[in-house]
Amino acid sequence: MSGAHEGAAPHGGAGPLGHFHLAQELDFNSARPPQLTVGNSGGPLDDGPVDTNAEQQSVGTPSQQVHESVTKLRSGGLGIFGYADLRYDGTTWNLAFRDRTGDLLDGRCRLSTSTDHRTFVC
C-alpha cells in the first residue's frame, strides 16, 4: 500500500455506513442513572437490538452491568414517529414521548429519587 492508503486498515477501508432510529433505556439497578438513547425524531422507530443480548453486559467507565434493556417505547412500540422530551421539575427528571404534533403518548416517566436504585418509573 502506498500514498493515501498507507494508514488504511489492512482489510480495506470500506464498510457499511448508516444509522437507525431507536429508543432504548438501559437500567443498571444501582445509583447510576439509566442511560437513554432516543432517535425517533425524523422517522419511525426501527427494530432495535434484542434486549436480552444487552442485559448483563458491562458498559461505561467505570464499567457497570446492564440490569434491563428496553428498546420499545412504553407507549406504542415500533413505528412511532415523534420525539421525547426530558425536563427537570426542580426535584427530578421527567421523560415524555410525544407524537409528531406534540401530543403526549400514553403517560410520562419520572426518574426515581432513590439514591440506591435510579430508574425511570412509568
Image (cartoon, rainbow, N blue to C red):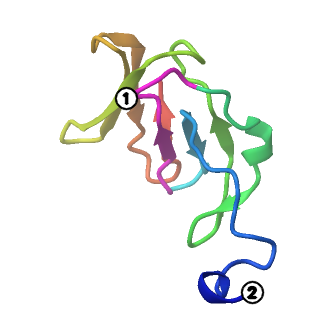
Question: Principal SS element in the magenta part?
Answer: loop
Q: Is residue 88 magenta?
A: no
- The residue under label 1 is 84
Residue visible at 20% across and 36% down? 89
Residue farthest to the front, as pictured: 3
In the rendered structure, the answer to whether residue 105 lies left or right of residue 35 reads left
> In the rendered view, would you say 8 is above or below 72?
below
Counting other residues with Cα less than 10 Å from the Cα at mark 2, is it few (<14), some (14-19), or many (20 or more)? few
- The amino acid marked with disc number 2 is Met
Q: From the viewer's side, name the closer residue of 45 and 60.
A: 45
Alpha carbon of mark 2 to alpha carbon of mark 1: how far?
A: 47 Å
> In the rendered view, would you say 5 is above or below 79?
below
Q: Quadrant of the N terminus?
A: bottom right
Under circle 1, the secondary element is: strand
Find the magenta span and give its range: 32-45
- The amino acid marked with disc number 1 is Ala
The earlier-in-sequence mark between 2 and 1 is 2
Q: Quadrant of residue 27?
A: top right
> In the rendered view, would you say 111 is above or below 7?
above
Q: From the viewer's side, name the closer residue of 45 and 114.
A: 45
The x, y position of residue 94, in whole percent, is 33, 32
- The residue under label 2 is 1
The x, y position of residue 8, in whole percent, is 67, 79
Judged by depth in the image, the label closer to the viewer, 2 or 1, is 2
